[in-house]
Image (spheres, rainbow, N blue to C red):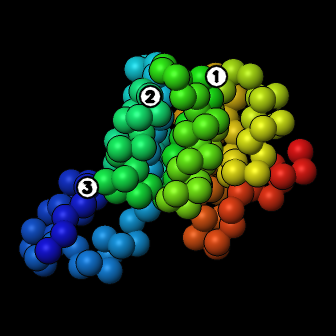
């Protein structure tokens, strides 16, 4: 039996029926946060939970992000364009999309770079500062497009 983080109500319900089925667990979409600013990462984590996604981890650099993705392939990733370390967010976003078919939502202060270099892999773009409801909306849209088999958000390719 596989367990997932589904909230207190779900846990109580599952205790009485034996836990979620493997089919229910497979339907839960997963998210990865790649952000080197702790407060922003925490805010993003709260939005991921609010969107109903299972957070598989928070990474502050590309190497950690790829290791987390290797362990549990995320459906969607919130990726800061500027990261600590030698590998930037654009590069790790491309790698996640290529290797794990992850829907990438870039987060940045400077949107021009994403619009020029990341349009072919981006499912969304959040310009800092952003509100929690914006994050939840982008996650919902990216998750839906990902399930439908898109490789990027159609509007990003022509922006």
- Nearest-to-viewer mark from 3 and 2: 2
- Residue 95 or 47: which is nearer the viewer? 95
Residue 2's spot in the image, x, y percent?
19, 69
Question: Which quadrant of the figure contains the C terminus?
Answer: top right
Where in the figure is residue 37, as x and y percent of width and height?
A: 46, 19
Helix, strand or loop under label 2: loop
Residue 39 image offset from top left, x and y in percent: 43, 20
Q: Report which residue position mark 3 lands on.
A: 5
In the image, 96: left or right of 109?
left
Gap between marks 3 and 2 measured at Cα: 24 Å
The disc label shown at residue 45, or none: none
Which badge, 3 or 2, comes first in the chain's sequence?
A: 3
The quarter holding residue 143 reads: bottom right
In this picture, residue 22 sits left or right of residue 32:
left
In 3D space, how far apart are the residues under numbered discs 3 and 1 (Cα atoms)?
28 Å
Q: What residue is at 64 percent from the left and 22 percent from the top? A: 129
Q: Which residue is mark 2?
A: 61
Disc 3: CA contacts within 10 A as few (<14), some (14-19) or many (>=20): some
The residues bearing labels 2 and 1 have C-alpha atoms spaced at a distance of 20 Å
For disc 2, the neighbor class at 10 Å (few under 14, some 14 to 19, many from 20) is many
Instruction: Please name the residue that numbered disc 1 is placed on.
Output: 129
The tag earlier along the polypeptide, 2 or 1, is: 2
């Amino acid at each position: 039996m596989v367990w997932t983080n589904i909230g207190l109500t779900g846990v109580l319900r599952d205790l009485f029926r034996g836990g979620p089925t493997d089919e229910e667990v497979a339907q839960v979409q997963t998210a990865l946060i790649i952000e080197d600013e702790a407060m922003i990462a925490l805010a993003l984590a709260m939005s991921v939970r609010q969107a109903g996604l299972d957070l598989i981890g928070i990474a502050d650099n590309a190497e950690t992000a790829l290791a987390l993705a290797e362990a549990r392939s995320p459906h969607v990733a919130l990726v800061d364009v500027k990261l600590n370390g030698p590998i930037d967010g654009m590069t790790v976003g491309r790698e996640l999309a290529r290797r794990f078919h992850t829907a990438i939502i870039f987060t940045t202060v400077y949107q021009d770079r994403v619009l020029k270099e990341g349009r072919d892999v981006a499912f969304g773009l959040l310009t800092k500062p952003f509100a929690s409801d914006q994050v939840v909306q982008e996650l919902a849209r990216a998750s839906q497009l990902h399930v439908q088999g898109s490789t990027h958000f159609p509007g990003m390719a022509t922006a």
